[in-house]
Amino acid sequence: MVALVALDPDAPRVVGIAGDRVTARSVAQTMSELTGTPFKLQFAGTTGTLSLLGKAVRRFSATTDAAFPAWQGMQYFVSMFSGEAQLRHVDNDRYGDHDWTSVRDVLAAHLASQAEVSPAVVK
C-alpha cells in the first residue's frame, strides 16, 4: 500500500488505512476458538493508572539503548485502550478493493508456526 500512496500525486498528507479492527475481548474469543483453550481478559488497571506507571518507569529507569523500553510498551497500551490511537478517517477504498489480512488469519498462522516447534500448542 505504501507504494500506491507514494505514486499518488493527489494523496492527502495523511492516508488512513486500517485492516482488521478488533477489541481485546474479540482477540481472546478468537484465540479460544482457534486453540480450544478458554482465553479471558485480565484487568491490569485503568489507562490512567498505566499511564502514571509508564511515566514513573520512564523517569526512574536506567538509560538504555533498548529499542523498546518497558515504559514504551506501557504507553502503547495506554494509546490503544484509551482510543487515542484509533484512526478517525479511514480511506481503505482509495486504491480499490483489497483483501485485508484478518487478525484471525495472523493468529492462526502464528499458532501454526508454533506447532512446528511444539505440537502441543494447537489442538
Image (cartoon, grey):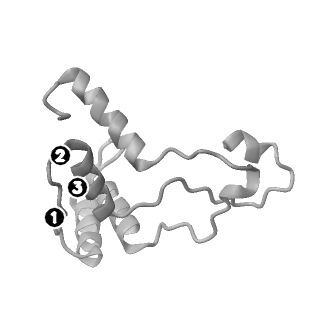
Disc 2 to disc 3, how far (Cα)?
40 Å
Amino acid residing under circle 2: Gly
Within the image, what quadrant is residue 38 found in?
A: bottom left
Q: Secondary structure at mark 3?
A: loop
Q: Residues within 10 Å of mark 2 (few under 14, many from 20)?
A: few
The answer to which of 6 and 71 lies nearer the viewer is: 6
Which residue carries the number 2 mark? Answer: 36
Which residue carries the number 3 mark? Answer: 61
Percent x, y of residue 48: 28, 78
The answer to which of 114 and 122 lies nearer the viewer is: 122
Q: Does the CB distance between marks 1 and 3 fall below 8 Å?
A: no
Q: Secondary structure at mark 1?
A: loop
Asked if one can make out residue 62 in the rendered structure from this viewpoint, the answer is: no
> In the image, what residue occupies the spot 17% across and 35% down?
123
> Mark 1 or mark 3: which comes first in sequence?
1
Q: Does the CB distance between marks 2 and 3 fall below 8 Å?
A: no
> In the image, what residue occupies the spot 55% across and 66% down?
87
On residue 85, the disc is none
Is 60 on the left-hand or right-hand side of 75? left
Q: Quadrant of the N terminus?
A: top right
The answer to which of 97 and 69 lies nearer the viewer is: 97
Amino acid residing under circle 1: Gln
Which residue carries the number 1 mark? Answer: 42
> Mark 2 or mark 3: which comes first in sequence?
2
Q: Residues within 10 Å of mark 3 (few under 14, many from 20)?
A: few
Q: Residues within 10 Å of mark 1 (few under 14, many from 20)?
A: few
Where 119 falls versus 25 (above or below)?
above
Asked if one can make out residue 15 in the rendered structure from this viewpoint, the answer is: yes
Percent x, y of residue 118: 16, 24
